[in-house]
Amino acid sequence: MTIMGRLFTIGYSGHSAESFINLVTQNKIDVVCDVRSTPFSAYKPDFSRALFKAHLNRSGVKYKFLGDLLGARPTDRTCYVAGQATYERISNSSFFQEGLSRIKIGTRSLNLALVCSERDPIECHRAILVCRNLPDMQDHITHIHTDGRSESQPDLDARLVDMFGLTPPPLLQEEGDWSKAVSNAYKKQGEAIAYREKYPRDNKDEQS
């Protein structure tokens, strides 16, 4: 796969519509891909779907809703266990794979940005679920923080591993240890941030 563009991620919390769009234009982002399952914000109405799209379009940036494919709260009940969304099940679903395919196709020629609400990508499924499942694009992913600071995907991996105290001792590290540490860290964080229903449904398909 030839990648000419880049994939960015941005959280809109802490931003006004103006400051958010400034970040988008400064990074030459062509398309904002909204990965919220529900593209609505009562707290920040400028980021509700219709207004958000209008703000972006006026600035020459396209808007694409992908929350039905790449959102963290899927309607497919087979993606839940005991009322909690399971990232492994979501990542194996046909709709999620379709969403990833659209991202891969888009970045062949355009700069895309995955957008959700959380400030820190490490606390959001845009990094922990979506970017984690784009192994061929790791060197083409940039997470943009609220202050405009950029973080590469490998740097986010290292921060996540360190957060859980899983960094292998340098003198004892063997081949494959780092990959295992990264996988374990993503699994732990995925379980920590995955959506939990307030009133879990009794569904036999959710049993592990």
Image: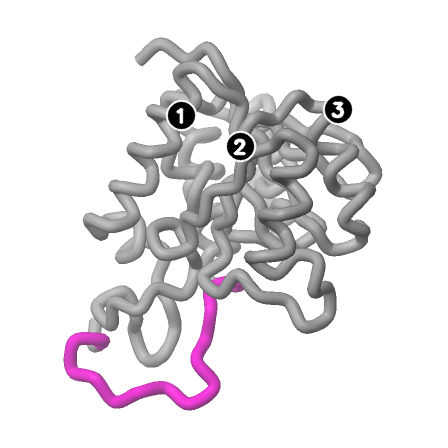
Quarter of the image that includes the N terminus: top left
Identity of the amino acid at label 3?
Gln
Give the numbered dot on residue 120: none
Q: Is residue 77 above or below residue 138?
A: below
Residue that label 2 marks = 31
Q: Is residue 185 visible?
A: no
Q: Is residue 24 visible?
A: yes
User: What's the residue at 57%, 66% (across, down)?
Assistant: 40
Residue sitting at the far left: 204
User: What's the residue at 54%, 23% (across, down)?
Assistant: 111
Residue that label 3 marks = 26
Task: Point out residue 64 in the picture as x, y percentages from the top left corner.
Answer: 46, 43
Task: Point out residue 174 in the picture as x, y percentages from the top left corner.
Answer: 44, 23
Distance CA(mark 3)–CA(mark 2): 13 Å
* Label 3 with label 2: CB-CB less than 8 Å: no
Q: Is residue 72 left or right of residue 49?
A: left
Task: Point out residue 36 in the picture as x, y percentages from the top left corner.
Answer: 50, 57
The crowding category of the residue bearing disc 2, from other C-alpha atoms within 10 Å (few below 14, some 14 to 19, many at least 20), is: many
Q: Is residue 177 left or right of residue 12?
A: left
Residue that label 1 marks = 106
User: What's the residue at 71%, 27% (across, down)?
Assistant: 25
Color encoding of the figure = one colour
Observer-nearest residue: 117 or 41? Answer: 41
Q: Is residue 119 left or right of residue 92?
A: right
* Label 1 with label 2: CB-CB less than 8 Å: yes
> Magenta segment range?
192-206
Task: Point out residue 172 in the picture as x, y percentages from the top left corner.
Answer: 53, 26
Distance CA(mark 1)–CA(mark 3): 19 Å
User: What's the residue at 57%, 57% (across, down)?
Assistant: 50
